[in-house]
Image (cartoon, rainbow, N blue to C red):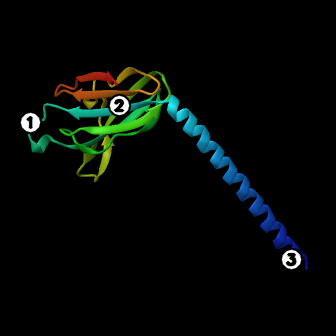
């Protein structure tokens, strides 16, 4: 008899906990939807130019740091292809930093390139406006210099 009561109490506790969690998730979704309209969109495209031939065209991706916190990474592709990253961002001035990772065929994994081989400068400041898309195109030159172009629409 005590065993049945204990099971009944455990079931009641579990069910009451589930209903609370469902309400909390739905409330959170409404809040996210409200702030989503206030956010701006960031679209980042990175490409390396000056690749002389297929033997020099490595598979790479870039880790993205926004305001000194890692926020994600670009798609993976050859250096001569666009690698993209897209996210929603609160309107403000933001610091974006890039970190280049390349596939090491001998190790069979991606490794961070030395600072000498990273883009220079590896950062830029952008202003994201509410309800608008900020597109940042980063072009890495053969000598390691980076060119940033920013377009808001």
Residue 52: mark in rendering: 1
Q: Quadrant of the N terminus?
A: bottom right
> Image height check: is 73 above or below 153?
below
Residue at numbered disc 2:
98
**Residue 129 lies in what quarter of the image?**
top left
N-terminal-most mark, 1 or 2: 1
SS at mark 2?
Answer: strand
Residue 57 position within the rendered picture, expressed as x and y whole percent measured from the top left: 16, 42
Q: In the orientation shown, which residue stands out farthest toward the bottom?
A: 1
- How packed mark 2 is, by other alpha carbons closer than 10 Å (few <14, some 14-19, many 20 or more), is many
Locate residue 140 relative to residue 91 in the image: left or right: left
> Image height check: is 149 above or below 12?
above
What whole-number distance in Å separates the C-alpha atoms at marks 1 and 2? 23 Å
Residue at numbered disc 3:
3
Name the front one of labels 1 and 3: 3
**Residue 144 lies in what quarter of the image?**
top left
**Residue 59 lies in what quarter of the image?**
top left
Q: Residue at x 47, y 25 (%)?
A: 130
Locate residue 149 relative to residue 20 in the image: left or right: left
What whole-number distance in Å separates the C-alpha atoms at marks 3 and 2? 59 Å
**Are discs 3 and 2 less than 8 Å apart at CB?**
no
Q: Residue at x 13, y 35 (%)?
A: 51
- How packed mark 1 is, by other alpha carbons closer than 10 Å (few <14, some 14-19, many 20 or more), is few
């Amino acid at each position: 008899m005590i065993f049945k009561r204990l099971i009944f109490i455990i079931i009641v506790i579990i069910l009451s906990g589930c209903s609370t969690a469902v309400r909390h998730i739905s409330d959170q979704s409404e809040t996210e939807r409200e702030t989503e309209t206030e956010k701006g969109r960031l679209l980042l495209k990175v490409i390396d130019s000056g690749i002389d031939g297929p033997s020099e065209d490595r598979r790479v991706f870039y880790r993205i740091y926004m305001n000194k916190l890692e926020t994600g990474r670009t798609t993976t592709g050859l250096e001569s292809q666009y690698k993209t990253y897209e996210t929603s961002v609160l309107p403000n001035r933001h610091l974006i930093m890039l970190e280049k990772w390349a596939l090491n065929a001998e190790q069979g994994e991606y490794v961070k390139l030395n600072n000498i081989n990273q883009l220079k400068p590896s950062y830029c400041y952008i202003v994201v406006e509410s309800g608008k898309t900020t597109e940042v195109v980063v072009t890495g030159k053969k000598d390691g210099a980076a060119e940033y172009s920013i377009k808001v629409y």
